Amino acid sequence: MRDFVLGELRRFANTVRWSVAGWRAAWSTEKSLRQWTVVNVLSAVLVFALDLSAAERAVILALGLAILAAELFNTAIEEIVDRVEPRQVDWARKAKDCGSAGVALVALAGGAAWLVVLAA
């Protein structure tokens, strides 16, 4: 049992280490990730400054994190596409545009949540 627990703790530590490395790599090269992070910090401050329910806060905070996750997925797509096909070809442009559209949709969902909460 002890070996199992230690093995799981090691795997968890590796997962955390790789996740932090991915965040740092994206942070250093992706201005949009830095911008969305600032927006999320401001949103989090505002969500706790306003008189909102726990559910409203949870939805807004979760969507903010989803925007960051979408941005990281988009960065991964762009990195892979750029390495596989450095030329401007239709399929590469489509893949990158779809990743960008995914970020935009999650951001719209976050904005819609704010609008609904503020209008209520």
Image (tube, rainbow, N blue to C red):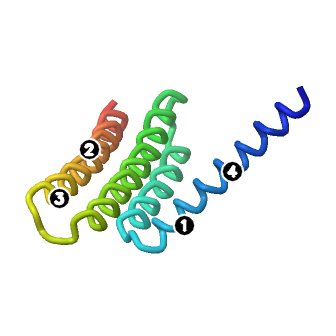
Along the line of sight, the residue nearer the viewer: 10 or 71: 10
Q: Position of residue 97 (x, y in %)?
A: 18, 55
Secondary-structure class at tag 1: helix
Point out the frontmost of discs 3 and 1: 3
Label whose residue precedes the other's in the sequence (1 or 2): 1
Q: CA distance from mark 3 to mark 4?
A: 32 Å
Give, as a three-letter code, the residue at label 4.
Answer: Asn
Q: Position of residue 94 (x, y in %)?
A: 14, 53
The image shows residue 80 at horizontal and vertical percentages of 33, 60
Q: Which residue is mark 3?
A: 92
Q: Residue drawn at (27%, 60%), measured in percent from left and top?
A: 81
Distance of mark 4 from mark 2, alpha carbons?
33 Å
Q: Name the residue tied to disc 2.
A: 108
**Eye-nearest disc, 4 or 2:** 4
Q: Earlier in the sequence, mark 2 or mark 3?
A: 3
Residue named by callout 1: 24
Q: Residue at x 73, y 49 (%)?
A: 13
Mark 3 or 4 closer to N-term? 4
Q: Quadrant of the N terminus?
A: top right
Q: CA–CA distance between discs 1 and 4? A: 15 Å
Residue 49 x/y as whole percent: 54, 47
Q: Look at the image and tell me in which quarter the C terminus lies.
A: top left
Q: Which residue is mark 4?
A: 14
- Circle 4 packing at 10 Å, graded few (<14), some (14-19), many (20+), is few
Which residue, as the protein is rendered here, is positioned at the far front? Answer: 84
Mark nearer the N terminus (1 vs 4): 4
Query: What is the CA distance from the residue labelled 3 to the residue labelled 1?
Result: 25 Å
Give the secondary structure at mark 4: helix
